[in-house]
Each structure stands twice: as structure tokens, then as C-alpha cells.
Image (cartoon, rainbow, N blue to C red):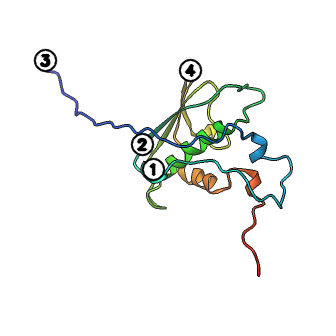
Amino acid sequence: MRKQQLPVQVVSTAHVRFDRVSKKRKWEDFFPFRIDENQQNCPEIPMPALEKYQDLDVVVAKLPCKGWSGKSGMRDVFMLQVNLVVANILVESGWVTPEVKRAVYAVFVGSCGPMQEIFRCEDLLRKVEDHRVYKPELRRLKQTMLMPPASCQLAQPYGETG
């Protein structure tokens, strides 16, 4: 019996590089207890150059789970940044036109899992030990990414009059 040869598929990888949010920043810098309308400098969360990552099918991210607990969740600025980076890359890669969207997947490695505010339980395809595979609904994910990522940005002035 002759073995059937499978077609060779080319797989390429891309390491996503981005500047890490400052370790000096705390959750309260982005999500203050009270929003100050006069606050002029809401800190930014650095994102990679998304145009470099327009044709990815799968994004794999190792989550920074240090300090996470199942009861209290996680309020970590770097965790927020990793989730935002993955979500923005998925939207950039999967959203071809408003009518055409490619299937894209996120794989998260870590005991804590991704932020449920961004990656919903309904999008979870598979969980094996500390690996989770998501296939997000791109329209909802894009809407989420269009919102300000931090509540301190809600009070930003739109412009000056005069």
C-alpha cells in the first residue's frame, strides 16, 4: 500500500513587537475612581504598528498572570495592554471590508485567561489546561476596540472654542 502524501503547507510566524506600558503606571491612572473633566493628560497604552500585521490567521499571546486570583480578577495594566494588542491585531487581520471578514483566532497561554470584557466566553472554542482558543466575532470586537480603552479618556475635551 502506497502512502498518500499530504500537501506541504507553508507556515510563517511574526513576532509582534510593541513598547510595554510603563511599569510606573497603575490601574488607577487609567481607571480613576472619579473622572476629572479637567484632567489633561490621560496616559497612553502603546500599540504596535498594526499595518505590519494585516494577514495573520492566529495570534498567540502569553498572558502575564502574576498576581491573578479567580475571586478578585486582575487589574494589571500590562494585562490590559496584551489583551488590547491581540484584539487590535485580530481586527486588523480579519476585517477585510465591512462585508468580508476572514476567520481569525486568538490563543492565550496562561492560568488567568484573557479579559472577559474583550474576549467573551461565547467566543471560546476550546480550553486545554492553561491554553484557550478564541474565535471572536469581529464586528463586536471592532466596536469594542473603537471605544476608549480607559475611563480617564472619557472626559477628554474635543476641541477649544474661539
Identity, as a three-letter code, of the amino acid under mark 4 = Glu
Q: Residue at x 70, y 35 (%)?
A: 76
Q: Residue at x 83, y 61 (%)?
A: 38
Q: Nearer the viewer, mark 2 or mark 3?
A: 2
Badge 2 or badge 3: first in the primary sequence? 3
Q: Nearer the viewer, mark 1 or mark 3?
A: 1
Q: Secondary structure at mark 4?
A: loop
What is the x, y in percent for residue 161?
A: 76, 78
Left or right: 23 with respect to 61? right
Mark pair 3, 4: CA separation: 39 Å
Identity, as a three-letter code, of the amino acid under mark 1 = Ser
Identity, as a three-letter code, of the amino acid under mark 3 = Met
Q: Which mark is residue 93?
A: 1
Q: Which mark is residue 1?
A: 3
Badge 4 or badge 1: first in the primary sequence? 1
Badge 4 is on which residue? 129
